[in-house]
């Protein structure tokens, strides 16, 4: 069986080439590359985020707003039923009074409970670790919403219009953060990360947790980070610092 | 004899009218811009199989850029009127005209965008 060269192999090649041209120079980790047409997502990658909550302002909603625009989520001003893929959570230590704010979205668990409970197989984990809802076969039972310890998923209660071409969504299906899978497949980064870098305080980094040379992996190997509800052992791909 | 001639003439006229009606029968729909990924007969018979097969490849395996994409259908088959794209599932448009004629409901567009580009109008 022949296998297409992995991204890691390509990067190795690129690094060797660069060393030959300019020895002694430290390479900046190359940007994430678009996957060529016809090639499926692979377990070589595991996409994740590192969120530095010390940089996250409680008043800033750049990531939330960017997500709504990117994914075509209407603001109907009905907080109980409006779809939200990402939300800001403000937390306070009652003993010390220390407050901070952090964005919470689908944590793209390695062992996602939403996938375990789904009766149809609609709730699924892609090979590269992105947890998605296949709305073609979602029956809207909402077991996954109950199983998710992060309250990450929403349910479309109403007929939808003005959907984005890259985020089809309709009444009767569960939905949630896709880690902007359409952008990742095209070599980009999630809309929330981009908005945080552009108009926020650059608290979020996106990258490949499986690639030891990615910025996110290098930081995670050097700095302390935590997972929300690490006690559940779900191994989320979203890591936090400062909580 | 006169009566027979009149009847025959009437019958001929009726048949002609029927012939004309038969030519107009079937759905009328706007022509696409550009070349289709398959020939028209194959698409008429199998477009739903193509779409259903590819949707699983794209959604579940992450295979992008394959041949039978609903987005591409919409981008070629949506008509532009006054600078705005008309939804392909609007009455008389490409998807709706045949599906209405055949009385086959489509579920694609309860979720999928019906105009090219970013969103529905």
Image (cartoon, coloured by chain):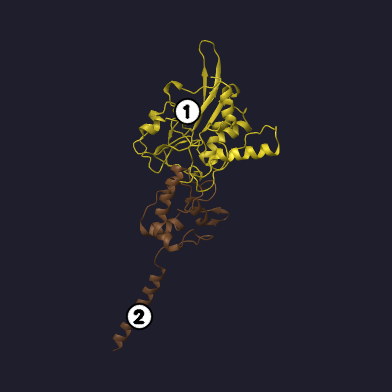
From where the camera sits, is residue B55 visible?
Answer: yes
Q: Secondary structure at mark 2?
A: helix
Q: Position of residue A221 (x, y in %)?
A: 56, 24
Q: Which chain is indicated by disc 1?
A: A
Q: Residues within 10 Å of mark 2 (few under 14, many from 20)?
A: few
Indicate left or right for B82 with B112 as reference: right
* Residue B12 tag number: 2
Q: Classify A60 as above or below B65.
A: above
Q: Disc 1 to disc 2, how far (Cα)?
A: 78 Å
Q: Position of residue B67 (x, y in %)?
A: 49, 53
The chain drawn brown is chain what? B
From where the camera sits, is residue A60 visible?
Answer: no
Residue that numbered label 1 is attached to: A236
Count of residue discs: 2
Indicate left or right for B69 with A54 as reference: left
Q: Secondary structure at mark 1?
A: loop
């Amino acid at each position: 069986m022949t296998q297409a060269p992995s991204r890691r192999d390509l990067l190795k090649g690129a690094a060797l080439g660069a060393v030959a041209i300019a020895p002694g120079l430290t390479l900046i980790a190359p940007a994430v590359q678009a996957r060529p047409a016809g090639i499926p997502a692979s377990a070589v990658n595991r996409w994740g985020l590192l969120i530095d909550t010390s940089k996250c302002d409680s008043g800033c909603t750049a990531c939330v707003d960017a997500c709504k625009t990117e994914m075509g989520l209407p603001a109907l001003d009905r907080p109980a039923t409006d779809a939200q893929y990402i939300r800001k959570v403000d937390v306070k230590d009652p003993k010390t009074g220390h407050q901070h704010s952090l964005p919470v979205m689908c944590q793209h668990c390695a062992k996602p409970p939403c996938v375990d409970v789904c009766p149809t197989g609609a709730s699924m984990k892609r090979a590269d670790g992105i947890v998605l809802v296949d709305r073609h076969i979602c029956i809207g039972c909402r077991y996954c919403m109950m199983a998710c310890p992060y309250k990450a998923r929403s349910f479309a209660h109403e007929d939808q219009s003005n959907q984005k071409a890259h985020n089809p969504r309709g009444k009767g299906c569960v939905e949630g953060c896709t880690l902007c899978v359409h952008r990742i497949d095209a070599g980009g980064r999630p809309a929330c990360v981009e908005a945080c870098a552009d108009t926020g305080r650059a608290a979020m980094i996106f990258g490949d947790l499986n690639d030891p040379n990615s910025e996110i992996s290098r930081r995670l190997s050097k700095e302390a980070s935590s997972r929300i509800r690490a006690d559940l052992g779900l191994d989320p791909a979203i890591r936090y610092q400062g909580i | 004899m006169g009566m027979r001639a009149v009847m025959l003439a009437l019958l001929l006229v009726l048949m002609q009218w029927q012939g004309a009606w038969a030519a107009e029968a079937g759905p009328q729909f706007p022509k696409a811009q550009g070349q289709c990924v398959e020939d028209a007969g194959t698409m008429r018979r199998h477009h739903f199989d193509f779409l259903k097969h590819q949707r699983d490849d794209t959604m579940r395996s992450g295979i992008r850029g394959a041949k039978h994409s609903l987005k591409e259908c919409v981008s070629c088959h949506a008509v532009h009127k006054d600078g705005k794209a008309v939804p392909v599932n609007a009455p008389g448009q490409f998807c709706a005209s045949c599906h209405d004629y055949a009385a086959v409901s489509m579920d694609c567009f309860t979720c999928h965008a019906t105009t090219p580009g970013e969103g529905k109008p």
